[in-house]
Amino acid sequence: MTTAEAPIVVHDLTMAYGSFVIQRDLTFTVQSGDIFIIMGGSGCGKSTLLRHLIGLMPPAKGDVFIDGENFWTAPPEVQERLKRGFGVLFQSGGLWSSMTLAENIALPLQEYTSLPPDQIREVVSLKLALVGLAGFEAFYPSEISGGMQKRAGLARAMALDPDILFFDEPSAGLDPISSRRLDELIIELRDSLGATVVVVTHELASIFTIGNNSVFLDADTKTMIASGDPKVLRDECPDLKVREFLTRGELGRQVPAAGVPQTSARGAG
Amino acid sequence: MLVEEKEAVDGVKDTPRERGAIQVSRPAEGTLPVHLSGSWTLQSDRPTVAELQRQIDAAAPVQRLTFETSGLTAWDSGLVTFLRNVEELCRSRQIAIDRGTLPDGIRRLLDLAAAVPERQEARRGEARDPILARIGKWGIGVVEAAADMLRFIGEAFLAFLHLLHGRASFRGSDLALLLQECGAQALPIVTLISFLVGAILAFIGAVQLQQFGAQIYVANLVGLAMALEMGAMMTAIIMSGRTGAAFAAQLGTMQVNQEIDALTTLGISPMEFLVVPRMLALVLMVPLLTVYADLMGMLGGAAIGVTMLDISLKTYFNQLQEALTIKYCAQGLIKSAVYGVIVALAGCMRGMQSGRSAAAVGQAATSAVVTSIVGIIVASAILTVIYLRVW
């Protein structure tokens, strides 16, 4: 199979907190150069899936292959090496609050490269400029706005020129313009760095603008119910739930709007 | 928002409160018209469902309820909850409800409330486990907590081995800042407390020793007590409240902010980057602070000795010098190093174990202080016995 070459292959993954299963039987492949969307309703386990992919939470069952290596059975040195190829933008930015933006971005460089301080300073200023924060080197995360924190988090995620970039809800809490600019930045990064991008989001505008592949997680059946290009899924997915999600519920709008019958026992919503 | 034509805010005290009322007419062919009148707000007195139920019972058999709302002056959630209860009641008695005459807003709210059926598993059961199950769960919890503690101590130990090999990754500037926080900045409070503890010891001792005319032994009492135990213990307890709790809160907040996740995904061990410098700082600073606290305590004793017992400073310190040996001081210092480890471990462990909410961070700080104080007292007892038997 060609999947051995793919940057991320998830095989038969089951995620659980103790005995409480979040999602089961997840199998999908992220191809090199993809902008891969993990989508689904609130609470379906999107962010938990991301934690499995970036090495924060071991699977209850199944495997995650990164660059052909089985991440969770690999020895710690291999895990470390694989993690070094990740850049992660956390939901809240995840910046280290006791350090300035420059120190935040410099830390990965200091840890993993032997660059002299003045070169590190140059790289830091480049990364900050790329996300539109040139000149903010000496600011602490608490001194800048939420949107700027997100962008600074992105600058840190790019510090080591990673092969795979992970974004957890990148546009949450951003105004429409900033969120659109972030989308453009993501595409730009993919094209210029040749990185593979995995994005957790339920922002429809982003999904269609940037995504070329996706997986849809369903909270009720606790598994993935669709995968593929989101634009194709919107028009052709056989599952009504996926099409409703991708059209903001416009499909079923006419049916139950007026008199909701009181006693009809619908499935747990 | 819900209130339609609500009059100026009800004066709850002065005027008699507005009331809501129900009245039923006589049923015609099983239909019971219910007249709702007056003010049906949460603030007003209004009838309960039980009253309507009595009237329905009195008028039986009823197959249908209709509402007459022309006398209604104001309503809010008070009326909607009442009607929801009425619907509940009618469903159980298979009485039909005609909502047609209710105000439009109420009808829509009732529809909205009924649109998504109650999720059965969402309602948390209040069922209590039988006593044996509770004891069992408690036991499992204790074992798990002990295992977590051992795991944390093991990880901390491994991180220190890395440090000894010169491979631990933390920033020197972080360590310097922590040393300052745990050391120099703790001096004022350590000064105050140990001076007073020394004075209190001397004062209590003085009252007793004066009865035998042995006032001069106040110096021995204060010197030995401070050097052997009180200096180390007071310092450790101050540091657990001051620094241990701060560590737990810092690390807990970093959990909440995903800062620790960010370290982990970069392949930087949080144990090495965050826990090792904090432990180092406390293990280095607590013994130093203890030496200082010992001296301050002895000074406090001297203050009492000079002012109350007419002992000259010179005699006091000569007596001290005779009473104190290197052995006693060393025993106290070893204790203080152990306490430092305990305070640092407890603070860092509770912080790293903290959940991801504001309440969890508060619990982590509390639990750090409790854990370290218990640890300090237990360690003190064990070390004292060891000193008595072995040294």
Image (tube, rainbow, N blue to C red):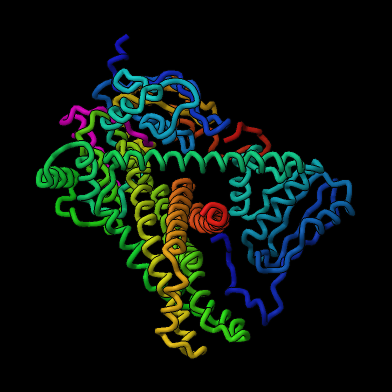
Compared across the picture, whether B384 is left or right of B314 comes to: right
- Res A71 quadrant in image: top left
Residue beneath the point at 61% across and 82% down: B208
Residue beneath the point at 31% across and 25% down: A78
Closest to the observer, B280 or A259? B280
Q: How many marks?
A: 0
Q: Is residue B207 above or below residue B128?
A: below
Residue A13 seen in the figure: yes
Residue beneath the point at 10% across and 47% down: A118
Closest to the observer, A151 or B104? A151
Closest to the observer, A181 or B313? B313
Q: Is residue B252 above or below residue B123?
A: below
| Residue A192 belongs to magenta span | yes
- Res A220 quadrant in image: top right
Name, please, the residue furthest toward the front. B322
- Expressed as whole percent of the image width and height from the top left, the position of residue A251 reads 45, 30
Compared across the picture, whether B266 is left or right of A40 comes to: left
Residue B366 seen in the figure: no
Q: Is residue B307 above or below residue B45?
A: below
- Expressed as whole percent of the image width and height from the top left, the position of residue B376 reads 52, 57
Q: Tell me which secondary structure the magenta stretch mostly adopts.
A: helix
- Res A28 quadrant in image: top left
- Expressed as whole percent of the image width and height from the top left, the position of residue B88 reads 74, 46
Name, please, the residue furthest toward the top. A1
| Residue A266 belongs to magenta span | no
**Magenta residues, as a range?**
A176-201
- Expressed as whole percent of the image width and height from the top left, the position of residue B239 reads 44, 62
